[in-house]
Image (spheres, helix red, strand yellow):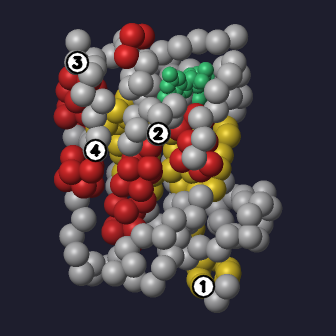
Amino acid sequence: MSRKKSAKGKAVTSSPSAGSPAGKGAGKTVRSSPGIVQMNGVVHPSRPSISNSSEFYDIAFKVMLVGDSGVGKTCLLVRFKDGAFLAGSFISTVGIDFRNKVLDIYHHMNPPHAFPTFIELVMSEEAWLTEIHEYAQQDVVLMLLGNKADATHERVVKREDGERLAKEFGVPFMETSARSGLNVELAFNGVAKELKHRSIKDPIEKFKLQEYVNKEMKTTGCCRS
Ligand SMILES: Nc1nc2c(ncn2[C@@H]2O[C@H](COP(=O)(O)OP(=O)(O)OP(=O)(O)O)[C@@H](O)[C@H]2O)c(=O)[nH]1
């Protein structure tokens, strides 16, 4: 079955590191963070249930994509992880799907490090932002994404409405496209940078996610209706 929805809201949510030492990889300390969903408590790079890769990281964060079914959470995840668009017929995720990706950021602040565990959480159609506020940790990093920005003729949510909702909840907003790759890297990297920033006790430089997103964000420039 194939379904399409354009520019529907969804959120990248995440939580910063709690910093409990959990193991070692290539001489680096591995830490994990409690997220909205706890997965085995501690993330260890050599634990196959978490990651099959041989990648090592310093800090692990969990990032969740929540939103209505069919808005493109899996495709965003795959686009970010593998750089490809998962085209074809739509098979709804049952339960939770997840990917790991190791990022190098903030070279100027710390030695190379890395992280997160990305988790897709499938939620029901209604009130997901409210649910996040109800159940997530206070300091969770939130970002609102309107995906399928490429599907201009099938748009169901105006950019202005996304912007308004984001403003209401005080979270950054941008439109993305898993198909074209528009702003996908930026969405995940922005959250990763914010998480990393929060995990540093006395950061040399300030990082403001909203400002970063506003500066780096690309718009389709075609979709106001
Ligand atoms: N045009 C367009 N189609 C997309 C985009 N992202 C996803 N799709 C299509 O939308 C459908 C649903 O995508 P999924 O990533 O499976 O959606 P989901 O949110 O993970 O759905 P659930 O697993 O049910 O929660 C698929 O047919 C995708 O090909 C996009 O950026 N642009």
Q: Where is residue 121 in the image (x, y as percent from the top left)?
A: 58, 37
Local SS, label 4:
loop
Q: Residue at x 28, y 44 (%)?
A: 217
Marker disc for residue 185: none
Separation of marks 2 and 3 at Cα, in angstroms: 19 Å
Q: In the rendered image, which residue does mark 2 sit on? A: 181
Q: Residue at x 39, y 78 (%)?
A: 107
Q: Three-letter amino acid code at disc 2?
A: Gly
Q: In the rendered image, which residue does mark 1 sit on? A: 28
Separation of marks 3 and 1 at Cα, in angstroms: 47 Å
Left or right side of 77 for 197: left
Which image quarter has ligand 1?
A: top right
Q: In the rendered image, which residue does mark 3 sit on? A: 224
Q: Which of the two discs, 4 and 1, labels the residue nearer the N terminus?
A: 1
Residues at discs 2 and 3 in contact (Cβ within 8 Å)? no
Q: In the rendered image, which residue does mark 4 sit on? A: 217
